[in-house]
Image (spheres, rainbow, N blue to C red):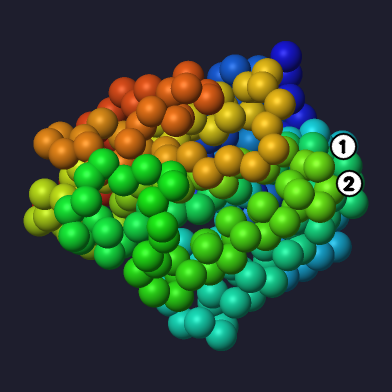
């Protein structure tokens, strides 16, 4: 059944992969981002601090996929707070007011940073969190807000702990240089398949945290069992499949 989906962050690297997969599957997709998303006709351009723009984008949607955020550690007061805290508030309250029933929220595997460093594998969704820094802490806030909305308003909320999808040649170099990073890699195509399955699932959810990861080259850092059980998701790509373009930038 086709879903009416609002995809925030539709122009980002993961967002473009999710957009392509949702459209391929025949869903009604509306994007929201700072710039228009190539190939997406239904688009609202705006910022996460503009509640009116978010409200316009949310109308007529039954599913929210919220990817938009400051995507890594950055200046706290001017980047993380406006986008990852205030922006999250706007998006979730707008979704509730518009009657959106399923909220699929992008969290991060950086919530398990220090346990990953200690090598306690495989980590599961029930492993106590140990955020890397303020970005990770903002995603802990996102998960707490998601749980509150599920309990308070009866909404279906899935918090998705994403692996590492490199956006720049510098990040590609970091992954090339670190064996552990190759094991937590996530291609945009795998992300697209995952979020499509999360939107389409006929299950009735309450609140769930789920890992979204690719195929590890060596060590299964994060347990893939829950994603397979609840959504039928199995990753297809291992490093560097899907990141050839950013790796090529290293040679330029």
Rendered residue at 33%/36% (across/down): 223
Q: Quadrant of the C terminus?
A: bottom left
Q: Nearer the viewer, residue 238 or 56?
A: 238
Q: Position of residue 226 (x, y in %)?
A: 44, 30
Q: Nearer the viewer, residue 64 or 117?
A: 117
Q: For mark 2, what is the residue? A: 98
Q: Nearer the viewer, residue 229 or 7?
A: 229
Q: CA distance from mark 1 to mark 2?
A: 8 Å
100 with respect to 115 (left or right): right
Q: Position of residue 10 (x, y in %)?
A: 58, 45
126 with respect to 5 (left or right): left
Crowding around mark 2 (Cα neighbors within 10 Å: few <14, some 14 to 19, many 20+) is: some
Rendered residue at 85%/62% (across/down): 52
Q: Which mark, residue 117?
A: none
Marks 1 & 2, CB-CB < 8 Å contact: yes
Rendered residue at 67%/60% (across/down): 145
Helix, strand or loop at disc 2?
helix
Q: Position of residue 156 (x, y in %)?
A: 72, 38
Q: Earlier in the sequence, mark 1 or mark 2?
A: 1
Q: Position of residue 12 (x, y in %)?
A: 49, 50
Q: Which mark, residue 60?
A: 1
Helix, strand or loop at disc 1?
loop
- 150 above or below 90? above
């Amino acid at each position: 059944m086709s879903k009416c989906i609002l995809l925030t962050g539709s122009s980002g690297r993961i967002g473009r992969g999710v957009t392509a997969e949702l459209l391929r599957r025949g869903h009604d997709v509306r994007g929201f981002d700072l710039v228009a998303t190539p190939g997406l006709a239904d688009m609202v351009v705006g910022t996460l601090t503009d509640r009116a723009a978010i409200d316009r984008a949310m109308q007529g949607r039954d599913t929210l996929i919220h990817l938009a955020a400051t995507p890594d550690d950055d200046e706290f007061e001017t980047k993380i707070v406006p986008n990852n805290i205030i922006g999250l508030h706007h998006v979730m309250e707008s979704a509730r007011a518009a009657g959106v029933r399923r909220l699929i929220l992008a969290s991060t595997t950086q919530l398990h940073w220090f346990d990953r460093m200690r090598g306690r594998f495989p980590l599961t969704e029930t492993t106590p969190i140990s955020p890397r820094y303020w970005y990770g802490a903002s995603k802990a806030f996102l998960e707490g807000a998601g749980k509150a909305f599920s309990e308070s308003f009866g909404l279906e909320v899935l918090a998705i702990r994403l692996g590492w999808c490199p956006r720049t040649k510098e990040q590609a170099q970091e992954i090339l240089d670190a064996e552990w990073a190759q094991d937590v890699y996530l291609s945009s195509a795998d992300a697209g398949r995952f979020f499509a399955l999360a939107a389409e699932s006929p299950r009735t959810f309450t609140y769930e945290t789920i890992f979204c990861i690719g195929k590890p080259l060596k060590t299964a850092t994060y347990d893939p069992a829950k994603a397979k059980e609840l959504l039928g998701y199995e990753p297809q790509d291992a490093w560097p499949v899907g990141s050839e373009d950013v790796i090529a930038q290293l040679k330029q």
